Image (cartoon, rainbow, N blue to C red):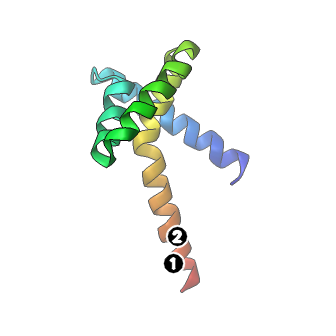
């Protein structure tokens, strides 16, 4: 993965995080809902991680919130692109 890809992903995560803030939701609420749907134990680990990262300010929260949406979509499109290249 190139540095440019990482920068684009961080910007996308930040923008999506701002959108969630505008919709008056919190990073904890969004991440907690997703992890609880996957497994109850993941929610506990997530809260501990957020407690560690909480001292870094709201930017970390925006990036994490945006990453909930951006990273899975990016991974999906990346995988689809890889499949198309093999054909």
Q: Residue at x 72, y 45 (%)?
A: 3
The quarter of the picture where residue 37 lies is top left
The image quadrant of residue 85 is bottom right
Are the residues tagged 1 and 2 within 8 Å (C-beta)? Answer: yes
Q: Is residue 69 left or right of residue 2?
A: left
Which residue is found at the position 68% from the left and 46% from the top?
A: 4
- Label 2: few (<14), some or many (≥20) within 10 Å? few
Nearer to me, 16 or 49 = 49
Q: Secondary structure at mark 2?
A: helix
Please tell me which residue is depicted at 34% across the width and 22% down the height of the picture: 26
Q: CA distance from mark 1 to mark 2?
A: 5 Å
- Measured as percent of width and height from the top left, residue 45 is found at 45, 33
Quarter of the figure that contains the N terminus: bottom right
Left/right placement of residue 28 relative to residue 54 reads left
Residue 32 position by quadrant: top left
Q: Secondary structure at mark 1?
A: helix
Q: Which residue is mark 1?
A: 84
Q: Position of residue 42 (x, y in %)?
A: 40, 40
Callout 1 environment at 10 Å: few (<14), some (14 to 19), or many (20+)? few
Residue annotated with mark 2? 81
Q: Is residue 20 left or right of residue 10?
A: left
Q: Residue lying furthest front in this view?
A: 41
């Amino acid at each position: 993965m190139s540095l440019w890809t990482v920068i684009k992903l961080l910007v996308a995560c930040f923008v999506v995080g701002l959108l969630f803030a505008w919709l008056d939701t919190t990073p904890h609420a969004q991440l907690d809902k997703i992890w609880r749907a996957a497994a109850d134990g993941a929610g506990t680990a997530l809260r501990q991680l957020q407690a560690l990262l909480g001292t870094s300010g709201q930017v970390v929260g925006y990036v994490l919130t945006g990453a909930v949406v951006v990273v899975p979509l990016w991974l999906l499109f990346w995988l689809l692109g890889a499949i198309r290249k093999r054909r």
